[in-house]
Image (cartoon, helix red, strand yellow):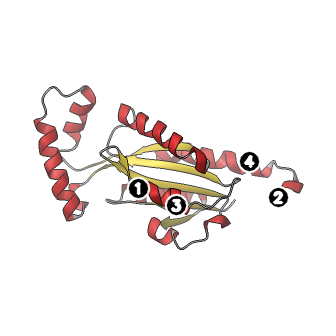
């Protein structure tokens, strides 16, 4: 099964997961800018990874605009963010993405915890993030998830771990098994 892992990464966490997935799945690994010139219909499966910031998943428009119309193509989305995976915002975003990409045959959406590195942000994003951090830290009566986030965003941290790609690899394996079990006349 030919697989492409396509990613959008700002500070390197999503790219790290893309490389781990591609290596484990023996897949092509493409930055979103390089993937735009590829014929994606040649792939049996596409794994798309992007990063979340402020509840917004970046480069979703690329996914919607560039996926070929291939009804049998397996599509998996993984999201990388600074929040712990049990955060309610992560759960809400996952459900929102499932609804948004139903028409694009994306049925598997996974979250991979990344980290935070203010120094790797572009200058404009860094300035906005510094303002956000000051405002967020000054907020009174934080909920428990907000208090946890406040403790996390004051320093650089990295919680990426290859164990988080295991469900993604399992989803790809199931696709491979289904393809292998199809009668020969369906290939």
Helix, strand or loop at label 2? It is loop
Q: Nearer the viewer, mark 3 or mark 4?
A: 3
Q: Quadrant of the C terminus?
A: bottom right
Label 2 – label 3 distance at C-alpha: 27 Å
Label 1 – label 2 distance at C-alpha: 33 Å
Q: Earlier in the sequence, mark 3 or mark 1?
A: 1
Q: Which mark is residue 150?
A: none
> Residue 16: x and y, percent?
42, 58
Which residue in the protein does label 4 denote?
177
Q: Earlier in the sequence, mark 2 or mark 4?
A: 4
Q: Is residue 161 visible?
A: no
- Displayed quadrant of residue 153: top left
Which residue in the protein does label 1 denote?
14
Crowd around label 4: few <14 · some 14–19 · many ≥20 (10 Å): few
> Residue 82: x and y, percent?
32, 45
Q: Nearer the viewer, mark 2 or mark 3?
A: 3
145 w.r.t. 20: above or below: above
Labels 3 and 4 touching (C-beta < 8 A): no
Q: Quadrant of the N terminus?
A: bottom right
Give the residue at x 32% y 40%: 83
Q: Earlier in the sequence, mark 1 or mark 2?
A: 1
Which residue in the protein does label 3 denote?
65
Q: Nearer the viewer, mark 3 or mark 1?
A: 3
Helix, strand or loop at label 1? It is helix
Helix, strand or loop at label 3? It is helix
90 w.r.t. 165: above or below: above
Label 2 – label 4 distance at C-alpha: 14 Å
Which residue in the protein does label 2 denote?
187
| Identity of the residue furthest to the right in this view | 185
């Amino acid at each position: 099964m030919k697989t492409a892992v396509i990613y959008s990464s700002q500070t390197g966490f999503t790219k790290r997961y893309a490389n781990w997935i591609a290596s484990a799945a023996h897949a092509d690994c493409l930055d979103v800018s390089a993937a735009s010139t590829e014929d994606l219909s040649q792939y049996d499966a596409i794994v798309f990874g992007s990063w979340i910031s402020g509840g917004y998943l970046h480069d979703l428009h690329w996914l919607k605009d560039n996926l070929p119309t291939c009804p049998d193509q397996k599509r998996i989305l993984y999201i990388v963010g600074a929040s712990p995976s049990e955060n309610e915002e992560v759960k809400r975003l996952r459900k929102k993405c499932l609804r948004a990409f139903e028409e694009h045959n994306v049925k598997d959406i996974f979250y991979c915890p990344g980290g935070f590195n203010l120094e790797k942000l572009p200058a404009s994003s860094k300035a906005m993030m510094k303002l956000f951090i000051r405002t967020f830290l000054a907020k009174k009566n934080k909920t428990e998830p907000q208090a946890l986030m406040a403790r996390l965003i004051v320093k650089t941290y990295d919680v990426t771990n290859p164990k988080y790609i295991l469900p993604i690899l399992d989803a790809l394996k199931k696709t491979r098994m289904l393809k292998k079990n199809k009668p020969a006349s369906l290939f």
